[in-house]
Image (spheres, coloured by chain):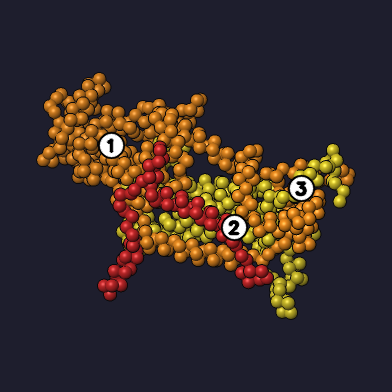
Amino acid sequence: MTIVDPKTERPDQAELDKAAGRPEDADQWTAKIRTTAIDALPPQKLLPDRQPAYVASWIYVFGVVTIAALLVVIGTGCILAIFGPNWWHVSSTGLFVNSLHLWSVETFMFAMVVHLWGKFFMAAWRGKRKATWITGVVSFLVSVGAAFTGYLSQQNFDSQWISTQAKDGINSTGAGAVFNVTNFGQMIMWHIVLLPLCIVAIVAVHVLMVRLRGVVTPFPAKGETPGADVAATAADGAEVPA
Amino acid sequence: MSPAASAKKVRTFKVDRDAVTWRGRYEPYDLAKEFLIALVVVCILVAGLAVVFGSPDDAPVTIKSWSNANTVDFAQTAMTELDGTSGTGSYGPPYNLNGTAQSVGPLAPAKWLGVHHPIDTAQDYVLGPLATLPDDPQVQGAIHEYTSASSGQQAAWDAAYEKAVANATFADGKLVVPAGDYGPVGALIAAETSMARSGALDGALLSSRQFYGTDYTKPLLFIADGQYLATLADNQHLSGDQWGMMNETGQYPGQAWLWLYTLWYQVPPMNNSPNGDLQVFVIMIVLTALLALVPFIPGLRSIPRWTRIYRVIWRNHYREVEAPRMATPGSPPEQSGSPPPVVDDGTRTPVPV
Amino acid sequence: MQSVVLVVGTIFGSLIDLNKPGNYVHWGFIQLSYGNLTVIVLMVVVFLAAILIPYRSHKGGER
């Protein structure tokens, strides 16, 4: 759609202006969605190439390691799906792919927990980042659920034991009326359709929230007292003169 | 809008809730490259672990394998299915109404939701499958005799046989039970045992309603009603009182993230309460909510500041910010030409301090 | 050909067979498998390493 200007090799601005952004179209849902999204997350904020200088610790890599592990989980899961649930029981290649899937799940949970510990000790919910923290906790819970339905879908002794034991806990909550852990067909569909979609959606929101607010700043240093100056405001909450 | 009304409300800075907006230095940080490196490292790590350790795949128990490995246990379980005293037979919702649903205080959600996966153990596990045996007049006759008897007569036969089968043995391909008046029950259980040992009972339970079965509820619950599966699990440290929820078969690491959930099952009163499952669930809901709502909970959200682990994580930052100030006490914080920190109240133009 | 099959079969099976009876730590009322204990200890070690090991980014471009 956009025509490249041969002089600058960038999208031709005149052509872009024809496609979108006219004042008379501002009430369109499309226009409103676009402007809200771009205002909240302009490209430089969505994909920044610089971070504050305090983002300099190995603890910061565990978020992206978790996501990388999730991709390997999904990728190996897709290979298992191509050949069907019986494949890994009868093929040594299938067993190997199952091993990849198991160990990528262990890596995923490992990295997620280290990431959780790091974010907790940084109090990363500070500065209007509570929703980021909450989406993180929710993604942990949904991941535990996804792992659980995966263990139930193994069609071996382990899944027999897990299902017949877990049913008691789940039945006690009433959820057993709908969520039947001994129903293999149901459990594998939760495992490969519903829960992965949930995880990907929640993780996407979580990452977008991190981009939106930025990485949390350190606690105030010794001698830094932002609280004292802020408290000295007019009673009606008027702006403190600069 | 008046200037006062348009002014942004400034609230008191709470160090465990709020964060200063960064006005300091930025450094190059290639997110895309970091992601690719992470992906490659994870792939190599996972492939290495898979090559070295593989993954477990213990063969499932079938009714056939169970009844052949421990015939007496099978026969005893089949008897409890016929008289409804088995775990499944007396479970209650969601399988039947023969048991009390778990409750905590006024909460009894299983009872409220009722029966959704109906199982009548006598019919579904014994009489129904036996009725499918073609060309066996003795078995069909025993079924007819049992089902046409009064419930009092059935109960008498059931009780007598259940007492006797506790001392049963299996020899020369036959179940041997002390003599007594069991009516047709002896023949029913003997036929059931033969059917199980041949493998025909597995098929009958799975395909009782349709050819393409994917719901293994009936055969699984039957197997779990016996001791055989539980003994195998106990040998692998998978039982509830062995912290088994966290464990995997063999020496493989299991689900370490379930540590807190399984911990409560080891602790009184949950560890021997008939409502233990629901009690543990309620505890975990509360603890999970606390984790999710840490940002709102004073005290809990102060733990990071009290433990001071952040001083290690951000030590370079604090070294930069605090050194000049500590060298000249009282001077405003100035390093690398960065302006004073600003309160981040979440708006796009924060109020300058 | 035989050796290729052997190598590939070994790789697709596993080098260390963990399908053996496990070992467990009994500490008061806590029971932990060696496998799980290893994972938990590793998580703590990795966390400590992550916050203690210096992180040096190359200033001015190439990382």
Q: Is residue A163 visible to us here?
A: no
- Point out the tag, 2 or 3, that comes first from the N-terminus: 2
In this figure, what is the number of numbered marks?
A: 3
Q: Name the residue under label 1.
A: B226
Q: Position of residue A161 (x, y in %)?
A: 35, 43
B181 and A41: which is toward the camera: A41
Identify the element where label 3 is drawn.
helix
Chain B pictured colour: orange
Which chain is indicated by disc 1? B
Indicate the chain coloured yellow by its letter: A
Chain C pictured colour: red
Q: Name the residue under label 3.
A: A226
Give the residue type that dot 2 points to.
Answer: Tyr
Q: Mark 2 points at which residue?
A: A60
Q: Position of residue A125 (x, y in %)?
A: 64, 47
Between circles 2 and 3, the one closer to the viewer is 3
Determine the CA span between mark 2 and mark 3: 26 Å
Give the residue type that dot 3 points to.
Answer: Pro
Identify the element where label 1 is drawn.
loop
Name, please, the residue furthest toward the bottom. Answer: A7
